[in-house]
Amino acid sequence: MKTNTHRLTAALLGCGLTLSLTACGGGREYSLPEAACGVPLDAEKIDPFLVDGKTFEVAGDPLNEPTAKKYWKCTLSVDDTLVVAFQVDAVDRLHDPMAASEEFRFANRAKMERLPFSGLGALGDRTAVISTECAGTQAAYLFTEVSLSTKTGGDTAERRKAIEAFAVDLVPKVQKALGCTA
């Protein structure tokens, strides 16, 4: 009888601990905005990078407002912790992210194959870079870098797939926000 009481007590304590940890975790108490820095967000594409927290914050330069700037940066964070950031540079030529001069941006860099638009891309464990034409009033070409927080854990192969999907979804939206015609 004593053994059954000990097992029951242990089970109840385990359940109580599990419930208290779940309640303390809080989950995602925030909602995602429809856009970040003038670029629409796809909730499905950003979901792999989201963490539990209370507030979702966007900081950066709006790409959809005319400016003389040639550089835009946008950071997305949860409770003051960076989740994902993207940077867009207006440049005068198509830069190859697989060039030796760009290697510093990546861990385990690989060429992005079969982009659904014209451009060059490279993918790393926490970074994706895509270079495309723009031919708009803001730029001739765009160099877009998407980077994740170093705290983003999980399976590396899954994270690479997710960052590539996010970047491939983001670039045409960036082009549209900046008025690109190519």
Image (cartoon, rainbow, N blue to C red):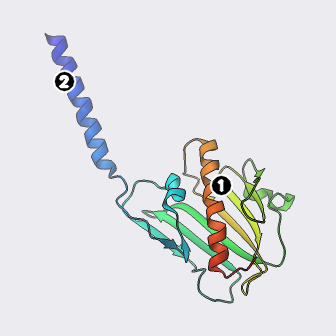
Q: Amino acid at mark 2?
A: Thr
Give the alpha-carbon distance from disc 2 to disc 1, as whole Å.
48 Å
The quadrant of the image that shows the N terminus is: top left
Is 150 left or right of 98, judged from the image as shown? left
Count of numbered marks: 2
Front residue of 74/132: it is 132
Sequence order check: which comes first, mark 2 or mark 1? 2
Which mark is in front, 2 or 1? 1
Element assignment for label 1: helix
Instruction: Count neighbours of disc 2 (C-alpha within 10 A) and say few if under 14, some if 14 to 19, many if 20 or more.
Output: few
Q: Mark 2 touching mark 1, by CB under 8 A?
A: no
Q: Quadrant of residue 71?
A: bottom right
Element assignment for label 2: helix
Question: Mark 2 sits on what residue?
Answer: 9
Front residue of 30/16: it is 30
Is 69 left or right of 32, judged from the image as shown? right
Q: Quadrant of residue 17?
A: top left
The structure residue drawn at horizontal position 15% and vertical position 17%, both measured from the top left corner, is: 5
- Where does the image place residue 151, in percent across and percent down from the top left? 54, 51
- Where does the image place residue 98, in percent across and percent down from the top left? 82, 57
The structure residue drawn at horizontal position 54% and vertical position 57%, both measured from the top left corner, is: 45
Q: Amino acid at mark 1?
A: Glu
Q: Does 67 appear above or below 129?
A: below
The structure residue drawn at horizontal position 78% and vertical position 66%, both measured from the top left corner, is: 118
Is 53 left or right of 173, judged from the image as shown? left
Question: Mark 1 sits on what residue?
Answer: 164
